[in-house]
Amino acid sequence: MGFLFDGLDAEAYDRQYNDGQLLRRIVGYFTPEARRMFAVGFTMLLDTLSRAAMPIIISRGVDEVQTTQDSGLIITYGLVVAALGALAWLFNFIRRWLTAEAVGNVVLQMREDAFDAVMKRDLSFYDQFPSGKIVSRVTSDTQAFSTVVTLTIDLIGQLLLVAVLIVYLFFVDTSLTGIVLIMVPLIIGVALGFRRVARFTIRHSRRVRAEVSALVQETVAGISVAKTFRQEHAVYADFLKLNRRSFWINLRMGYVFSGIFPILLMIVSFAVAALVYFGGLKVQAGELTAGDWYLFAQGVALLWFPLTSIASFWSQFQLGLASGERVFALIDSEPKVVQRDSRVLPELRGEIEFASVQFSYTDKERVLDNFSLHIRPGETLALVGHTGAGKSSIGKLIARFYEFQAGRIMIDGVDIRLLDLAAYRARLGVVTQTPFLFDGTVRENIRYGKPGAPDSEVERAARQIGNGDWLKSLTNGLDTEVGERGGSLSMGQRQLVALARVMLQDPAIFILDEATASVDPLTETLIQEGLDAIMKDRTSIVIAHRLSTIRHADRIIVLKQGKIIEQGNHDQLLEQGGHYAELYNTYFRHQSLEYIEAQRKANAEAAPESAT
Amino acid sequence: MLNAAKSEFTVANAYRYNRQNAARWLVSHIMRYRWFFFTTLFLYVCTYSAYTASEALIGQAIGAVIEPENFPLLPTIALTILGLKLLDGVLSLIGTLSVETIAQRLEVDSREELYANLLGKSQTFHNQQRVGDIMARATDDVQQLNGMMNPGVAITMETVIGLVVPLIFIASLRLELLLVPLLFIAFYIPVVARYVRRLNPMVRRQREQFGKMNAGLEETISGIEVVKASAQEAFERRKFRIAASLFRDYFVRQGYIEARYLPVLLFGVAFGLAFMHGMLLYQQGIISIGDVVALMGIMGVLRWPTFAAIFSISLVQAGVEGARRIVNILQTETELDQNSGGISQPIKGEITFEDVSFGYGKNHALKHVSFTIRQGQTVAIVGQTGSGKSTLTQLINRTYDATYGRVLIDGIDVREWDLNSLRAQIGKIEQDVFLFSRSVAENIAFGVPNATQEQIETAARMAQAHEFIMGFKDGYQTMVGERGVTLSGGQRQRIALARAFLSNPRILILDDSTSAIDSATEDEIQKAIRQVQQGRTTLLITHRLSQIRWADLILVVEDGVLVASGTHDELLRRSPHYRRIFARYDVALPPLETVAAD
């Protein structure tokens, strides 16, 4: 019964694809499963023949029994029908089992290919698509594809049965077969009409369900506010109105969905009555045996179910193909970052040079234009500027996460495009703005930077950050579970883990996008101390949001619209009164001790007012 | 109804359901619509009778067409078959609509009941529940009740009726003919039970594995920068392959179990044997050829119930599971005693903790905390996430009660205050301020619905919110949330402050550990907080050094213990932790006094 209702809630994807290419791709994936698929086809045929033979043998038996006295023959008929029933089950079992194996293998292969394709992509791909969409291509689209392949095979089996029976009936009696065939367009037509109405009601139903969810979500989340202010009655009245509306809309949909099968049954009943009548006339005239007449009456019952399936199948099939096509599109696309050689530098000193680099994420706006910058080995560089000035792009280009369009980036004097990426990145420490942790323990997360490092080394790295004091606040020390995405740890603790990860990795170049989330002052102090330890003795590039980081940097690079407009240290730049001074007043002033002290004065001045 | 007594919210004339356990609760919900239910049951019996009768009649038609004297009966028989089949269709339509109505009502009623119940639950309850869990109860679980009724219960009824009614018809043909169908049913029941027992765990495992595969991939992709930067692509690929292969294995195994569905085999064999039995009886002259064909027609009726059972079992199971989770919530009782009739007077604002501990077993969130806050003081509470800062403030407005020691307000134990009076005078602004999807003005006036526009604007001005509100196109009528503007953390906080100005609490608890913001916003918020703290006791959970610096009292909490308290200058001298923070600011620090307590 699922068939008729499937695919109604799917969105339409207006994509163009070449049927031939798509078919070739699908066949290509099924080629390793050729032997299984051949067996599937063969057992399907046998299954169909046994199932078609059952009513036919019964009809022969009904005719035979009226003329014979041989009970052995009767028993044989009964046993043959029973055996056919058992065989039909057996062949169907083998077919479905083999199908599951073949489809399972094909989908696994598609998933692996899709995964490999995803991993090969550079970060521009991940910017373009949210992670949920990528995941759904790799897992859900392949799943939808496999469902449709299975359904298609099932449907072919059912249609084969319909075809075999109709051909047989046609040879028995042409005009009665005509009555059966008249039903075909009628049932398909009604089923298609039903789907149109169903689509309408389901859309409304889904919308109202979303509204109810949103309302419940909001009031449950805001329940403390409602309670503090004693507004329960108003909130409940709102809910009641919507909940009752959702009842009527869902009831309408429920009625539409419940109505379809009884209606189809009623249509079929006209055909059955007609067959009984006209068939009866033919039996009386001696043109038809009683057994054949039975066969026609039964045949109708066997036909109508597959026919309703066809009505819904086409849109299902298209959706499945579209899913397949989305997966293939993912597999076939080319990554933009391409290495021309795979040189491994003997020892990375950490000298970086940007020479007239041009870079943009999309074709629209240029992020870096004719950008040149020389970073000395071991230097600590702070990048400051408004959002979109190009700060993080510099770090991402050094990590070779993106392809740039013109100019050159040299690492220790070697073109970055000639490097072996895996070896190069192993010498690169990156901490992102919201540090990402994998589900597992703190220890496992630190070790991610250097797989195979012994526990002692992991512990030493952890102790080098903030004197190891941060470990005390973890319930199980290094063996504390961090939870999904590090959710069990506070933001500050996640940053500390990420820093320890880099510490263990001991990279030659350290790239840090400083977090903007606020952290309690003590944790903040630990993080700062950890940063001091990491930045010592290695090239560090920091996209800075913390005043203290900027003050400790060897050089501050002030960026505006992809260009360096000022550079120097904090005091020099502040004195200049240029763009840096403006940035300082916008982002950093309130972190300064002067500001903190000034607030105290403002507070003291405000206090007497309240005393009155 | 014990829990009704403690509820903080009740609906007048609400229908009472039995909440003793999930099964009784479900039955009492369904029995609210007992006429619909019995109508459905009755109609299903009728519809299966009409259906089976029409199939039997087809067989009888054979008798008619074979005997010449019965020839005139043919049109009548054909029309009767048509009539029965149409009757079958109409009755089954009405029956299905009736059960569908119960299904939809079940969803709506239980959501209504749950919702009213949730509103009646105490704050304690809501603080302990995750929003996502409650959401799932109110949306997914109640929807599963809908599916449980139709098609779940509907198909179960059909299965039973669809197996029993045809048997009665067969018995009426000839009692001996029941032999094969009865044997079939005797095997069918245990075989289906076994099938469900084997399939269910596999379905669950497959679904879980799909979830794991998804979650793993999602994690890899979200952390792609770390993966690439650490050159760990191969490791991630191996992880994914293991997950995907395991899913394939479950997929194939489930396919195997489904393909093997034995009732189909039983039915096929029973079909053949019933045919044999019928023909043998015919040969012995016990039944007519029409009876044989009728028998086969009736046997055909059994086909659908044989298949349908598997659809319904899992649906009913899921529905009962959902009901169990809902009833669990309904049954949970409010722990706090409202103490209405307790002390109810204006709060002055002095707060004292006397050796307060909170928590169960080894996990004490607070351990032996003692301090006094004088009326009108501003207190900064400092500590790492999870150190017990929030718990400390939650004991003041009795979100929780201390497990040991006493919390006093104006020298009176909080448990002796009337809860309503106490909470009405303690305002709280959470870290992530919650705003309703209503206008800005309605949000500010949420606690004082009859506030005038002028009062709202005054409050907004004091909270430094007026300017940015006027910056919106619709000013105070601007809608907040999904269908309106998205407000920044700083803006939300200032609206919450305006809300606090309007409701004017005597004690204000402000969780100000929001994200870092730019200097201008920081200025505005500082100004607003300076305004709000005047004339009331204010507790700030904060990360901002500027606020810590100007607080009258600083409480440093670490792992549930109050490790230091005092003014800025005192702490610089006494607390090594506090010194460490300011050491980075190159402040000239006073000499450290060694204190035994630290």
Image (cartoon, coloured by chain):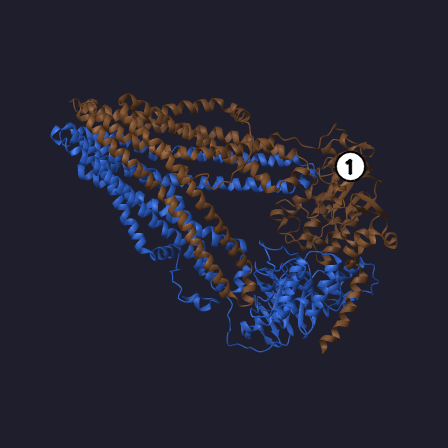
Q: Residue furthest left?
A: B69
Quarter of the picture holding the C terminus of chain B? bottom right
Res B292 → quadrant: top left
Viewer-proximal residue, A445 or B227? B227
- What letter labels the chain drawn in brown? A
Where is residue B291? Give x, y as percent: 18, 33
In the image, residue B340 sits, relative to residue B389, either above or below, namely below
Where is residue A377? Give x, y as percent: 84, 40
Q: Viewed as shown, does residue B434 lie left or right of A7? A: right
In the image, residue B197 sits, relative to residue B542, either above or below, namely above
Q: Viewed as shown, does residue A95 lie left or right of B180? A: right
**Crowd rating for badge 1 (residues with CA inside 10 Å; few <14, some 14–19, many 20+):** many
Q: Viewed as shown, does residue B493 lie left or right of A306? A: right
Residue at image coords 61%, 76%? B347
Viewer-proximal residue, B94 or B512? B94
- Could you tell me which chain the residue with mark 1 belongs to? A
Residue at image coords 51%, 42%? B208
The residue tagged 1 is A358
Where is residue A111? Give x, y as percent: 56, 33
- What letter labels the chain drawn in blue? B
In the image, residue A415 sits, relative to residue B10, either above or below, namely above
